[in-house]
Amino acid sequence: MAAKVFESIGKLGLGLAVAGGVVNSALYNVDAGHRAVIFDRFRGVQDVVVGEGTHFLIPWVQKPIIFDCRSRPRNIPVITGSKGEPWHGERGTGAAQGLFPPAGSGDGALKQRP
């Protein structure tokens, strides 16, 4: 009697573990400032761009490709007419700083072959 109970609990536990593994492999997360496109093994890269959040996919058939779309500050060397200001590195040179968006259109065409 007790052996049957333990056997049924074992089967139930194994079934829950397999189901949890499938659900875990069907979820993916896109962080803030990132975008994703989905690669499908049968249809190629899909045209839909996925925003941030948790999303579903078909396990072992689809794969998310995640891109970083945050703007980054860049220092641009600038030759100025000022002479010897203490916050400039060298005499007559300085740096301008600006935010630049990432290159590319941000759609599914980023990963497609020409």
Image: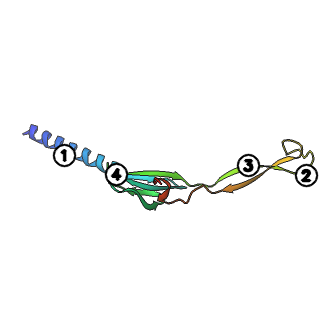
The residue tagged 4 is: 41
Of mark 1 and mark 3, the one earlier in the sequence is 1
The residue tagged 3 is: 75
Q: Can you name the residue that lies furthest to the bottom here?
A: 48
Q: Are marks 2 and 1 in contact (CB under 8 Å)?
A: no
Q: Residue at x 24, y 47 (%)?
A: 16
The residue tagged 1 is: 12
Identify which amino acid the numbered label 1 is placed on: Leu
Of mark 2 and mark 4, the one earlier in the sequence is 4
- Distance from the alpha carbon under mark 2 to that under mark 4: 58 Å
The residue tagged 2 is: 81
Q: Is residue 11 above or below residue 41?
A: above
Identify which amino acid the numbered label 2 is placed on: Gly
Task: Say which element carries label 1.
Answer: helix
Image coordinates for residue 82, horizontal then vertical, percent: 91, 50
Q: Residue at x 35, y 55 (%)?
A: 57
Q: Is residue 19 left or right of residue 27?
A: left
Image coordinates for residue 71, horizontal then vertical, percent: 62, 55
